[in-house]
Each structure stands twice: as structure tokens, then as C-alpha cells.
């Protein structure tokens, strides 16, 4: 049986952190549009105008991210299901996902919204660092990287869109995006809200609980 779950949440709400845990537990693929775009940036294959939007904290055109997801979901590691992290973000993206799943006779198990007050988000983002090698996400204060990574700053990524101006733009974009996206999924009875404040493992427990509800 396939398990397809969408994680929706503001920048810094913990989508990446929680997706990695869920995918490990359920043996499904982690599909993060943000990670795919950052990989394209490293490979030098991301078009300059898309790169500029991303670094400034704006949303990329729906068609560009939908094409990425459409291709990625055909990979063999997606056959048992996947956790979508950061996609869909708009109603047109949600409609494209719905059509794609229908064509493949698959369906969404749930859309989990990670709820964190805006005041906490900036603090999480500004202190985030990511291990360039493994993709592991750290927080300089709550979950610091191991000493060998801290000693060589070249091993840790401090995302360009985690600078204060871009953080503000991303949080504003999220607020306008959810105004339409969350009611779309609520009407379909798929939306599950989770309080995402507290220890990451406690948040994981709350996600398991809503996934078992059905
Ligand atoms: P993307 O990479 O998806 O960024 P985002 O949505 O802004 O989310 P983040 O990755 O910043 O945060 P997260 O929720 O994953 O939190 P994390 O687990 O890292 O997208 C980047 C850009 O790509 C977008 O701005 C856009 O330009 C473009 N893009 C991507 N998808 C798109 C789409 N569908 N349409 C259009 N454009 C798109 O945690 C953050 C920090 O908090 C870490 O330091 C972590 O250690 C810490 N933390 C996690 N959990 C907790 C906790 N419980 N308590 C305390 N700290 C915690």
C-alpha cells in the first residue's frame, strides 16, 4: 500500500526535520522541492531568474515546481509512497497534484499542517545550519552540529534565504499562500493540524497520532 502525505508549514516550522523522521519510519521517499531546487543551484542547472526569486524568498512559478515533482515521483524509490515537503504551496499546485495522483490511481492519506507562532520561526531560521554532506538539519542553540562540523564552516550550509530580509519575505509569502491552500484541503477533509512547538520528538509523536486517526 502506498502512503502519500503532504507536510504544510511556514518556513522554519520543521517540515524538513519531521519529513526525514517520517520517511525513515515508513520507508517512503522524502520529496522536498526546496532541496531539489538547492541541488539544481549547486549543479548550476537552475535558471538565473528562478535562482533570484528563491534567494529573495519568493515563490517560484507553479509550472516549474510541478514539473520537478511530476518527474521525481516516477523514480523507483517513490513506489511505496512519499512525504511531500514544501509542495503544494498554492491551490493550482494542489490541483495539479490531485490530477497527477488520479492518473496514477493513488491518493493522499493526509495533509499535516505544522503550526508554529510566527515569533518563533525567525529565531529557528536564523540559527539553522545544514550538513552539506548528509543534509542533516541542525539548530545552533537547540540541536548544535557536532564539533567536527563546527570547526570547519565549509562543511555547514547557512542558507542565503535564511538572512533576515529573505526570512521576512518567506513568512509573508506563507501567510498569503495558506489563506487559500488550507481551506482547499479542509473542504476535502484531509487537513490535520499539529502543534509543532516543543521538542522535535514530541512533535513527531503528535504527527503519528493524527496519521493514525483516519
Ligand atoms: P523550502 O526549502 O521548502 O523552505 P521553507 O518552506 O521556507 O521551509 P524551510 O526549509 O525553511 O523550513 P522547514 O519547515 O523545513 O524547517 P526545518 O526542519 O529546516 O523552500 C525554499 C524556497 O524554494 C522557497 O522559499 C521558494 O523560493 C522555493 N520553493 C520550494 N517549494 C516551492 C513550491 N512548492 N512553490 C514555489 N516555490 C517553492 O527547521 C528549521 C529550523 O528549526 C532548524 O534549525 C531546525 O533544527 C529547527 N527546528 C525544527 N524543529 C524544531 C522544534 N520542534 N523546536 C525547535 N527548533 C526546531
Image (cartoon, helix red, strand yellow):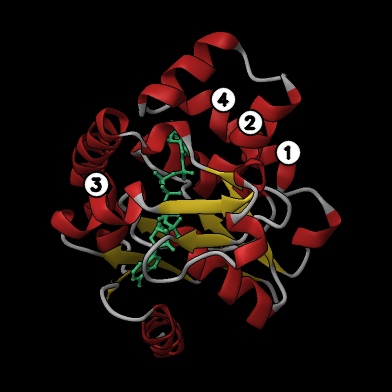
Label 4 crowd (10 A; few <14 / some 14-19 / many >=20): few
Q: Is mark 4 within 8 Å of ligand 1?
A: yes
Residue at 64% over, 82% down: 25
Q: Which mark is residue 67?
A: 2
Q: What residue does disc 4 label? A: 64
Q: What residue does disc 3 label? A: 178
Image coordinates of residue 178 in percent, x first then y, are 24, 46
Secondary structure at numbered mark 4: helix
Whole-angstrom CA distance, mark 1 to mark 3, is 25 Å
Residues marked 1 and 4 touching at CB (< 8 Å)? no
Q: Is mark 3 within 8 Å of ligand 1?
A: no
Q: Is residue 187 left or right of residue 90?
A: left
Image coordinates of residue 211 in percent, x first then y, are 45, 82
Image coordinates of residue 65 in percent, x first then y, are 55, 32
Q: Which mark is residue 71?
A: 1
Residues marked 4 and 2 touching at CB (< 8 Å)? yes
Amino acid at each position: 500500500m502506498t502512503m502519500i502525505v503532504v507536510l504544510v508549514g511556514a518556513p522554519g516550522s520543521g517540515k524538513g526535520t519531521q519529513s526525514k523522521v517520517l520517511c525513515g519510519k515508513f520507508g517512503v521517499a522524502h520529496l522536498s522541492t526546496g532541496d531539489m531546487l538547492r541541488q539544481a543551484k549547486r549543479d548550476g542547472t537552475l535558471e538565473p531568474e528562478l535562482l533570484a526569486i528563491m534567494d529573495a524568498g519568493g515563490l517560484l512559478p507553479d509550472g516549474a515546481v510541478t514539473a520537478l515533482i511530476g518527474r521525481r515521483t516516477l523514480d523507483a524509490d517513490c513506489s511505496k509512497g512519499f512525504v511531500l515537503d514544501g509542495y503544494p504551496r498554492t491551490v493550482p499546485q494542489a490541483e495539479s497534484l490531485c490530477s497527477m495522483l488520479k492518473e496514477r490511481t493513488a491518493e493522499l492519506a493526509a495533509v499535516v499542517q505544522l503550526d508554529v507562532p510566527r515569533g518563533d520561526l525567525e529565531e529557528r531560521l536564523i540559527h539553522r545550519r545544514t550538513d552539506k554532506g548528509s543534509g542533516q538539519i541542525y539548530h545552533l542553540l537547540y540541536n548544535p552540529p557536532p564539533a567536527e562540523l563546527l570547526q570547519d564552516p565549509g562543511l555547514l550550509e547557512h542558507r542565503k534565504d535564511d538572512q533576515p530580509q529573505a526570512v521576512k519575505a518567506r513568512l509573508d509569502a506563507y501567510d498569503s499562500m495558506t489563506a487559500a491552500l488550507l481551506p482547499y484541503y479542509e473542504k476535502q477533509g484531509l487537513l490535520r493540524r499539529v502543534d509543532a512547538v516543543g521538542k522535535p520528538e514530541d512533535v513527531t509523536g503528535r504527527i503519528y497520532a493524527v496519521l493514525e486517526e483516519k
